[in-house]
Each structure stands twice: as structure tokens, then as C-alpha cells.
Amino acid sequence: MNIAVTGTSGWLGSALIEHLRAQGHQVTRLVQRRPDADDEVLWYPELDTAGLAGVQAVVHLVGERVYGKWTEHHREAIRESRVGGTQVLADGLAKMEDGPRTLLCASAIGYFGDRGDEVLTETSPPGKGFLASVHREAEEAADIADRAGLRVAHLRFGIVQSTEGGALAWLLPQFRRGLGIRAGAGHQYVSWVSLPDVVRAIDHVLTTPTLAGPVNVVAPHPVTNREYADILAKVLGRPRFLALTRGLTRRMFGTDVADEIVLASVRAVPEQLLRTGFTFRHPSLEAALRELLD
């Protein structure tokens, strides 16, 4: 299969390309600058549809980082990268007469907002807050392609566990120094997933024609923030004795990021992946961390 991918310079995109090529797929890299290689095609600010000749599927991973202070400029960058960018891509694909017939778009469990202990499946309604609204609008933008007859899947990623980037890479230096922390009371749920399972899940969705609509890309056993901190400290052989109050968490991350990401509770489960026979390499957080940090 010839698969086009956006966000190929990031750690997730790089891992996906490596996996897809190892599985025998051909990869076309979609870029936001003038292409300078044979396997590159411009997709933003306008999709080069001619460059997608022979491509069967597109995986859209681009999205502005959500960590950092949410100034008006940063909020606009987050929204434009996810909503505006997805609309450009979906609209371009929808207008192609003989183009890719499958579109997988990165979404996230932030779609659900802060939901406490509620078990969240793909049919659960969206939550409230800035990130929830952005993810909802991005999924609606991708559905432009769905209405044109493409198979569209919304990949709602959990907290991806990787030493290359994301939350785990940020936490490791603190925990290795014995400064492991939990945020707030630690009762909030963390829906996590290992990087190897993310790329395998994307491959599974690409090659499973019956999978469309929302797909929760999360491990089957979410943990609380307290459990996550304790397991990571255990794997590293370091103590975990620090706890940030809600106030200190807001000071450290900013009120918006603290309330909508760090302190938010999302207990999502991968109902669609399990229904279609996907087997997780890392269903257990401790086993996943031990392999990733070995």
C-alpha cells in the first residue's frame, strides 16, 4: 500500500514511517514547505493533489504542541493546526476523483474533557473545555472527506509513552533524580498507550476496512495519576514521595494546561480496537515502561 503521512519529522511520525516501511508499505511524506525529495508532496497551505497519484491512504498527524502557556496566539495556533489543517487536507481529498480512499486523522482523548471515573468508549459524547472543542471541530472537519465517500477514522490518542518525546520524556529526568511526583490528589485517570502499540494500531486501522469513525488508541487498562507515578518510580528504582497540590500544579503548568490535561481525568478504553481483533503488545503499564526503559 502507498500511504501518505503528515507530521513525518516528529517522533511519532518517524516511528510510524519506520514501522510502515518494515511492513512493506510505500510511504509518501506530506510536507508544509517546498518539497526537496522524490517522496515529498506539499499539503499545506494547499494540497498538491497531483502528487498523490497512486496513494491509497493518508495518515494526518500534524498538530501544534498543547503544552506551554495558552496565550491567545498559542490557542489560535493549536486550533488552526488541528482544525484548519485538517479542513485543508480533507477538502482537497474530497475533491479528488481518483485519490486516496482512506483518511486517518489524529485526534486525542482530550475530546472527552475531564470526566472523573466515567468509562469512556468511542460512543461517549464530547466533553467541555478548549481542547475538547478543538478536537470535536477537527473531527468534524475530517468528516468533509467522509461525506465525499472516503473511509475516515478519528484516532483518539491517549498519553503516548515514549522516551523520544511527550509526557514520559519530560518526567524521566525528575524521577531519575528521585523527585518523582504526582499531581493533585492523584485520583485522576491517565489513559496511556505505548509508542509501539500506537504505530501498530495505526497499521491495524489502515488495514481493517470495517474500522471508521472514532477509534480510542489507548491501552486497555488506564491507571490513576498516583498509580502511574508509583509504577514509574518502581521501574526506575527511585522513591516517589512528592505530591503537587492543585495550586502548585496550576503554577507549574499554567491554569489551563493543568486543569485540561494534567489534572483532568480521562478513563478511556479501546473498544473498537479490541472488537476488531487488535492485540496489545503492552496492555500493562509496568511491562510497557520496563521494555521502553530497558
Image (cartoon, grey):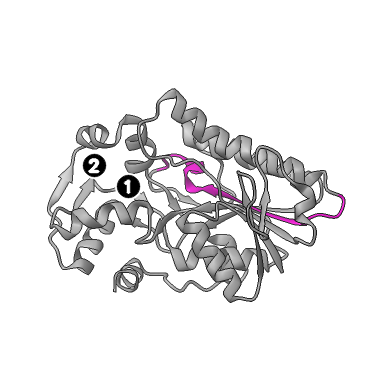
Q: Residues within 10 Å of mark 2 (few under 14, many from 20)?
A: many
Residue at which label 1 appears: 188
Q: In which quarter of the image is residue 173?
A: bottom left
**Residue for point 51% across, 54% down:** 9
**Residue for point 48% across, 48% down:** 109
- The amino acid pointed to by label 1 is Gln
Marking on residue 184: 2
State the CA–CA distance, disc 2 to disc 1: 8 Å
Q: Residue furthest front?
A: 36
Q: Give the range drawn in magenta.
A: 97-115
Relative image position of residue 86 (x, y in whole percent) = 64, 41
- CB under 8 Å between callouts 2 and 1? yes
Determine the secondary structure under disc 2. loop
**Residue for point 16% across, 68% down:** 237
> Taking 115 as reference, is 197 above or below it?
below
Residue 113 shown in magenta = yes
- The amino acid pointed to by label 2 is Gly
